[in-house]
Amino acid sequence: MNDVVEFFKQPLQDKKECSQQAGSLEGYGQAFVVSDDQKLDWADMLYLQVHPTESRTMRFWPTRPASFRHSVHVYSSEARQLAYRLLEFVARGAGAEPASLRAVFEGQATQGMRVNYYPPCRQQADRVLGLTAHTDPCGLTLLLQTNHDVQGLQVKKDGKWFAVKALEGAFIVNVGDVLEIMSNGKFTSVEHRAVIHPTKERISVALFHYPCQDMVVIGPQPEFIKGDKVRYKSTNYQEFLKQYFTAKLDGRMHLERLKLEQ
């Protein structure tokens, strides 16, 4: 993904040609800005809706470098096929039909891409976050780090934060909220955050795979319950997304609200 690196090397004025607009998640700017007085993360980002292709808003797609649009189209299309295969393996691992999850995420399903640029922070880098702790509101996230030798991603387990070592040319795969809910908790949405390096920049490319656009309700799927208690409420999918994207990031709080008392 050399083209995304080249995009962030451009002068600020050139990058601003793709700036976010009020009320839109897409474009160049800052992630998850919900109020004028909130503390912003130490990062810039470019968010694009890449699939379905007819849902693309091309004014947010950079024209420089010249190959950017083609590169993103090819890259995201191939990653989408990989996500389908992974979902088949996930379903099989839980004892469900391999096609049961894939069917929810193919066709007119949404795929979004967020490129995160984390500049170095020379003073008190240990007190600055590149991206606040959160989970992803999708099914699967495929994350690729362009400079694998710069550590930044951390995941939370048993109340402690652990660094994730990126491997060159390899994806980091995160389970998202939708998959946790649909699997009735058999797979856990990963709470994660990004920390800053004091002297080196870091760039990552995340591809988010959401259910089909016509999905109305998300909830535990019958094939994942089988003899277990239902552990999550079913909820309106569009309302779920709206609440996520209009609230301040806060770990797993929005997901915990959907859990049923056992």
Image (cartoon, grey):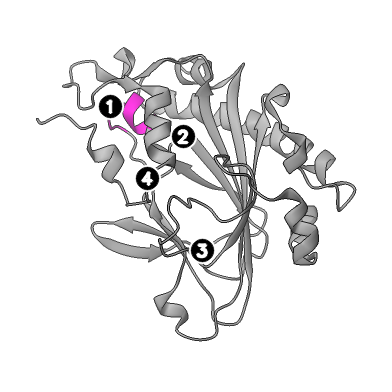
* Residue at the far left in the pictured view: 262
> Tag 1: residue type?
Asn
Asked if marks 3 and 2 touch (Cβ < 8 Å), the reply is: no
Question: Residue 261's image quarter?
Answer: top left
Number of the front mark, 4 or 1: 4
Q: Earlier in the sequence, mark 3 or mark 1?
A: 3
Give the distance between the C-alpha atoms of the residues marked 4 and 1, in whole angstroms.
24 Å
Determine the residue positioned at 67% across, 54% down.
Answer: 169
Please rate how many residues cluster around mark 3, counting C-alpha atoms within 10 Å: few if below 14, some from 14 to 19, many from 20: some
Q: Position of residue 207 (x, y in %)?
A: 59, 41
Residue 247 is marked as 4
Q: Position of residue 107 (x, y in %)?
A: 62, 16
Q: Earlier in the sequence, mark 2 or mark 4?
A: 2
Asked if marks 4 and 1 touch (Cβ < 8 Å), the reply is: no
Magenta-colored span: 178-186
Which of the two residues, 23 or 163, is positioned nearer the viewer here? Answer: 23
Please rate how many residues cluster around mark 4, counting C-alpha atoms within 10 Å: few if below 14, some from 14 to 19, many from 20: few
Q: Position of residue 173 (x, y in %)?
A: 51, 44
Q: Earlier in the sequence, mark 3 or mark 4?
A: 3
Give the distance between the C-alpha atoms of the residues marked 3 and 1, in whole angstroms.
29 Å
Which of the two residues, 145 or 61, is positioned nearer the viewer here? Answer: 61
* Residue at the far bottom in the pictured view: 123
Number of the front mark, 3 or 1: 1
Name the residue tied to disc 1. 184
Q: Secondary structure at mark 2?
A: loop
Please rate how many residues cluster around mark 1, counting C-alpha atoms within 10 Å: few if below 14, some from 14 to 19, many from 20: many
Residue 155 visible (yes or no): yes
Q: Position of residue 92 (x, y in %)?
A: 43, 23
Give the distance between the C-alpha atoms of the residues marked 3 and 2, in whole angstroms.
23 Å
Q: Earlier in the sequence, mark 3 or mark 2?
A: 2
Which of the two residues, 184 or 25, is positioned nearer the viewer here? Answer: 25
Name the residue tied to disc 2. 138
